[in-house]
Amino acid sequence: MSEGWEGRRIAHLDMDAFFASVELLTQPELRGQPVVVGGRSIPASGAVPRLKDYRGRGVVTTATYEARAYGVRSGMGLMKAAALAPEALLLPANFEAYARMSRAFKAAAAVIAPCMEDRGIDEIYLDLTEVEGGTRELGLRLKAAVLEATGLTCSIGITPNKLLSKLASELQKPDGLTLLRMEDIPSRIWPLPVAALNGVGPKAAERLRGMGLDTLGALAAADPVELIGQFGKSYGAWLVEAAHGRDERPIVTSREPKSISRETTFERDLHPKLDREALSAILLDLCARLAGDLARKGVFARGVGIKLRFEDFKTVTRDTTLEHPVRDAESLRAAARACLKRVELGKRLRLLGVKASALTRDGEPPPAPPEPFERPLPFD
């Protein structure tokens, strides 16, 4: 146990600008430059394009800290990012490489702290409570192990709970190590803006600011009755607890996925009839990728759904429940096409997605049934 540390020791390990950092491993000459990941491909010449030359509907997957300094953020449209950082370099995403590096850093961390909660491709929680060694020593060991396994840096927060550790891991990015105890909350946590709290989205943050609650300290001092009145019993009570850094959630070492989805935003709007061949290929590719995801997780889908976003940004979803669980690409495609038949396809499309839901580990997919429809389906 750590010197003078009582109770739980929970670490949140977050890889620094993960996707961009993976790209820079193979292109170290780009280090120190503003780099945005999110393009689909690079020119045939092999030259890395500038963001100002991008034309399309793609979004930023991630960006180096140099690009973030201009205001570029994950999920932002690439055209908007180009207005902020026109000279930034644009690289295509390589999700196979990211997944490989993700497995590597998690395996390295698990050697030191096997009680792990997987929170996604670039972050994990670790329970260090019963791990021998001082708290700072363990944090440094974890950082060194990740660096040796991947060549990448990470930032770690170690506190008595998951909520505080998530906050702490952001305080000294990149390559940081932050240790906080409950007595550190007034000096280290309360000065933070309310939006820093994981679970406070943009709308909630705006409402809190409208109440004069700009910081977590102000939130902690707020009247709980007023918060519950404004946000409801459950969320209002959680805000009170979170502002005081109280969180008893355990480390969850296994988590069954509820659904898996794949989607893509097109470089240009596609017409359901005029671009039917292109849409058919995209649908097939999405279903093939989704089938691979299901196979890797060892699960089958009892439900399949589709997501469409039209040129006017209207989004439509349709779902269907299957008689038998499936995970092969053709069965997923057949179910997706059946969902598409329930949508009026009169306008151009900018996004298409396919989702597998009601996942189960039981059963084998039956042979593909004969086509039950008498006329061609969308994206045939």
Image (spheres, rainbow, N blue to C red):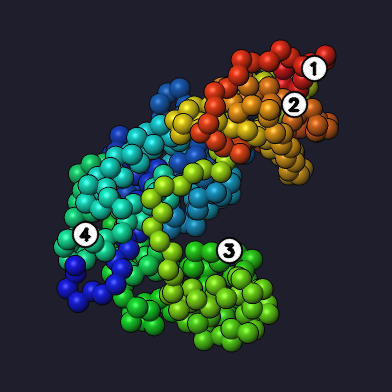
Residue at image coords 43%, 58%: 69
The residue beneath circle 4 is: 131
State how far apart marks 1 and 3 are (Cα): 44 Å
Q: Residue at x 38, y 57 (%)?
A: 251
Q: Amino acid at mark 3?
A: Gly
- Please report whichever mark, 1 or 2, sits nearer to the chain's N-terminal start: 2
Q: Name the amino acid type tagged 2.
A: Ala
Q: Which residue is mark 3?
A: 201
Amino acid found under the numbered disc labelled 1: Phe
Real-space Cα distance between discs 1 and 2?
9 Å
**Which structural element holds mark 4?**
loop
Tell me the residue that label 1 is attached to: 373
Examine the rendering and report whether any part of residue 318 can be seen: yes
Q: Residues within 10 Å of mark 1 (few under 14, many from 20)?
A: few
Q: Amino acid at mark 4?
A: Val
Q: Which residue is mark 2?
A: 338
* Residue under the image location 32 percent in, 56 percent down: 126
Precedes in sequence: disc 4 or disc 2: 4
In space, the residues marked 1 and 4 are separated at their CA atoms by 60 Å
> Element type at marker 1?
loop
Residue 289 in the figure: left or right of residue 305: left
At a point 64% along the width and 26% down the height, the residue shown is 324
